[in-house]
Amino acid sequence: MKIDNIKIKFIVFIVVVIQLLSSPLWGQRAVDYIDISNPYLRKIPVAIPLFKYLPENDEAKSLSAEITVLMTDTLEFTGFFKIIDPKSFLVDLQQSGISGNSLNFQSWTAIGAELLVTGGFELKDNLVVMELRLYDTFNGRLLVGKKYKGWKSDSRRIIRKFCNEIILRLTGTRGFFDSRIIFVSNGTGNKELYICDFDGFNIQRVTYHNTISLSPAFSSDGKWIAYTSYKKKKPDLYIWNLKERRGSVVDFNGINVTPAWRPNRFSLAAALSKSGNSEIYLLTGTGKIVKRLTFDWGIDISPSWSPDGKQIAFVSNRCGSAQIYILDVATGKAKRITFEGKYNSSPAWSPRGDKIAFSGRNNGRFDIFVINTDGSNVSQLTRNNSNNESPNWSPDGNLIVFSSNRSEKNRIYVMTAYGTDQRQLLSMPGEQSEPSWSQ
């Protein structure tokens, strides 16, 4: 590998994606290596050996160890893979090559690997050229091959881009490794908003209101957030552009809460009580009222859009207890879909459009459930004698992020869409709650 001369004004990140090898698989439909609709998913054994590095010095060796671990952690995060212990490896990529011609696939199938990720890079003057490959070991086939160029500090981003390619190749849907999560934390003594990467890395504080901020939500393009804050001593709706640091405030009399961005449009739904009762309204992206969507004596709150933007799931007590309803925006007709339990809240519509996750009170505590949009097949995902609340889906619909006090304090957790592989996402001072995943 050879690094071209790059000017000082080289942008922060350049990625060059090229097809490395010709294969009959390229351009074909993705092989069903991973059936994402299978609740009894078998994890695929994958081997990720230490990436080959040049030059053979301590700096390159350290970077190789770092990005190999990052690749391992990123793929393991999905819940799709069983990572094979490196102690069982029979081959050292530093002594061999990373391409199919130099790989003895029997050395990998012998230890149970069905997939193999190989990588190699050259590091020079703080610039890196990296080649990454995914192989089917049993068939000896290249499934994905990419080449990237960027700064050494871009290594994390490079790995995530390749992981997106892996998930696309194996499932037919692109991964979520470029996504972010926004959440509430009271580590400063006040409830402020923070954003982190999908895996809890790179935590950044967003608000500095020194009061209570709640119910954050990303717009579809990830450029805007909407949330409720008590900055003016009452619950008002704040709409904010993260990059341009500008926005607007919805501060009608009464409450202005629980915003939800309409998919792929610069508009949102929210609960306002300007008429004296909490109802769901449609607003422009600048906070102007387009129209009122619900008309009922009960309290209507917590809207969540269907992926096509034609329906809204919401919470209402119009039948005497808090239950989940679905509203057809065009007709204004609403139907109740939850009938078990006396308090169901925080609906979140799956990106695939077929299910709604929600938090329901069960035996005196809250747990996470999913239900089909027609009200059938209610499934309980959490069972651990603690409160589990505020579910929200990953962009591909394969994971659910939520808050739980199972460790005594509220923390952010993530699990698969079927409730497996539940683990804490991040650790920071105070308590964390109300997570929301970007698209």
Image (spheres, rainbow, N blue to C red):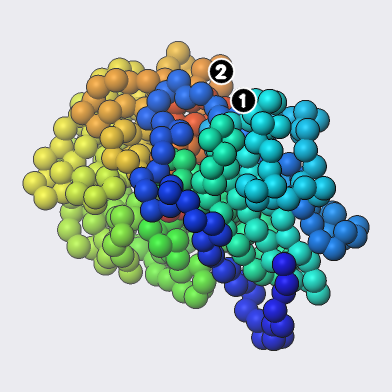
Name the residue: 35% across, 63% down: 250
Give percent across and percent down for residue 384: 56, 18
Residue 406's tag is 1
Residue at image position (38%, 53%) is 27
> Is any part of residue 85 visible from this angle?
yes
Give, as a three-letter code, the residue at label 2. Answer: Asn
| Image height of 42 relative to 120, above or below | above
Q: Residues within 10 Å of mark 1 (few under 14, many from 20)?
A: some
Q: Helix or strand or loop: what does disc 2 sit on?
A: loop
What is the three-letter code of the residue carrying label 1? Arg
Residue situated furthest front in the rendering: 101
**Nearer-the-camera pick, 179 or 247:** 179
**At which x and y percent is residue 43?**
55, 27
Residue 333's place in the image compared with 264, above or below, is: above
Compare marks 2 and 1 and give the one earlier in the sequence: 2
Q: In front: 389, or 44?
A: 44
Residues tagged 2 and 1 counted as in contact (Cβ below 8 A): yes
Q: Relative to residue 383, is residue 344 drawn left or right?
A: left
| Residue to which mark 2 is pinned | 384
Residue 130, percent from left and from top: 68, 61
Q: Residue at x 45, y 13 (%)?
A: 363
Residue 55 sits in quarter: bottom right
Q: Quadrant of the N terminus?
A: bottom right
